Amino acid sequence: MSENIYVGVDLGGTAIKVGICNDEGHLLHTYEGPTGTQDGVHTVIDNIEKYVRQIVADSPYEWDQLVGVGAGVAGFTNIREGIIILAPNIGFRDVPIRSILEDRLNKPVKIDNDANVAALGEAWSGAGRGIENCVCYTLGTGVGGGIIINGKIYQGFSGLAGELGHISVVPDLEAIQCGCGKMGCLETVSSATGIIRMANDAVARGDRTTLASVDKIAAKEVFDAAKAGDEVALRIVNRAAFYLGKSMAAVAAVLNPEVFIIGGGVSKAGEILFEEIRRVYAQLAPDPLQKDVKIIPALLGNDAGIVGAAGLLLRS
Amino acid sequence: MSENIYVGVDLGGTAIKVGICNDEGHLLHTYEGPTGTQDGVHTVIDNIEKYVRQIVADSPYEWDQLVGVGAGVAGFTNIREGIIILAPNIGFRDVPIRSILEDRLNKPVKIDNDANVAALGEAWSGAGRGIENCVCYTLGTGVGGGIIINGKIYQGFSGLAGELGHISVVPDLEAIQCGCGKMGCLETVSSATGIIRMANDAVARGDRTTLASVDKIAAKEVFDAAKAGDEVALRIVNRAAFYLGKSMAAVAAVLNPEVFIIGGGVSKAGEILFEEIRRVYAQLAPDPLQKDVKIIPALLGNDAGIVGAAGLLLRS
């Protein structure tokens, strides 16, 4: 096996997931071990090195075939300098992870934030395979995004391109404050957090809904209730979908992407969510911006982060 | 003079303007002649060829120094194929202008629409000189836009990137229908047409404004009245500025540009418009998207189209 390989690292608070990809972005092997966050920064870095060496050693590939290592991190990163500025879930602050890992592994290393890396994974080898220009939403605790232009992550002036969760979409009279300090951000309604908040509000004000009997509401319960015909739950789902579709119409007028890819936990709601997003997009986007444009679910699930991280070596 | 030169063509309904630029985008010579729209497509094409040959002949440069010719057109263009699909103001429909001019001039030819070309002109050698990533608004009869990424015009999937006038920004209850068929587009409030409409509406409903004594209101009269302290006019200007600032906050969350450049006739209103746009942007955009980001007027005025058209040879 003489092909090139790339290792992607998904650096999470509990587990570090690593994977080997080939030139085409096919995920060939994966490995997972504890992050060791509680034992401090040095242990976490030791573990990254260990797992990267381990997965290559356990594979049919030679170390020489490894072109480089990419890592995706939930947090603020300085991509050009390769520094994790702040990643609360692994306790990193101002860690020059790229140079540390390059010294230890003697291979090129690249880093990026988790939303960008997931977007690249989907664009390179998931739902966007073969597409040069796409926009990816990740609907989780927050709403993340990634912009892929000519097959690569687009960073913008200060690395903040693709902050799709902070497009202001909710009209003033209904807007609540976002964690970013501004009012009416997409994230306040279309993230899991936003959906759960709307559900809790509905229960608290006494709306007649099956959610009232749920102990601790998660987004999945809201979608399940909506699918079962609960009108209050359905209204919450439609609201989350409406603002997603509205934001996509705005993004389309700016970037005219071929494909919108939606991933993250909330996207698992499936067609009940996607149908409504597509309906709203068709209603709000000018006709020429609809022709042949697709709104589709992500394909790689939790592997998007590993694959995209590996892809940083080729596409950043 | 052994340097390379580039000729830009601004193909308007009344006049064809041509100009010679050097490698740095400096406009060295200009020439202008009638379009001849009334005499049909062949005459217009004859005129383009004539003016291009003329300006080079009248300049200190040799024909051999001419690298190529770029043309900007108000209308729908197929950029890849070099076809003007529909340009009502010059009576063109499905004219393969690129291949026709390449045959006649024996030089490479590129075309693009007027908003993209103006954006490129400003990015290359106007307000955005030295900036790799910027977003340009052109406020005229409509609201046009152009996205510059890594120094080049970004086209998107079907050539519709930068249709900033069709970002939906006006809340439902106040929205009116746009020419594109959708409701609440930026163009309905922040174009000269939108400003004139709001002024005519105010006069029609009897608002106390000095505009009531104006025979045929143009955008300039609204700005002049606002500067003179007319509250009705000021409210119209602030409304146009508000939705521009709101759209920029959305664009920033998508693309994180370093600079927003605003040109076109309406931008000549000056600080009364720009101050309000900046105030609204500061209010609506998350803080990290404001740091070092500038909102500035275009510099090239009517020459942006010629310069940007010349730039198509280097930057498209």
Image (cartoon, coloured by chain):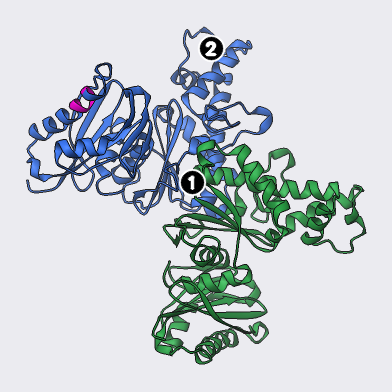
Chain colours: A green, B blue
Secondary structure found at label 2: helix
Mark 2, chain letter? B
Q: Position of residue B201 (x, y in %)?
A: 59, 16
Quadrant of the image occupied by residue B312: top left
Judge whether B241 appears above or below A316 on screen.
Answer: above
Quadrant of the image occupied by residue B175: top right
Q: Nearer the viewer, residue A290 or B310?
A: A290
Q: Identify the residue at the far bottom of this view.
A: A57
State the residue at coordinates (59%, 72%).
A303
The Cα–Cα distance between marks 2 and 1, rounded to whole angstroms, is 42 Å
Judge whether B269 appears above or below B199 on screen.
Answer: below
Q: With B81 as the anchor, is A154 left or right in this view?
A: right
Quadrant of the image for the N terminus of chain B? Answer: top left
Which residue is under mark 1? A256
Secondary structure found at label 1: loop
Q: Position of residue B2 (x, y in %)?
A: 7, 48
Q: With B165 as the anchor, is B99 left or right in this view?
A: left
Disc number for residue A289:
none
Which residue is under mark 2? B210
Type of amino acid under label 2: Thr
The local crowd at label 1, few if under 14, some if 14 to 19, many if 20 or more residues have their Cα within 10 Å, is many
Can the viewer see residue A84? no
Can the viewer see residue A31? yes
Q: Nearer the viewer, residue A153 or B46?
A: B46
Mark 1, chain letter? A
> Any magenta on residue B44?
yes
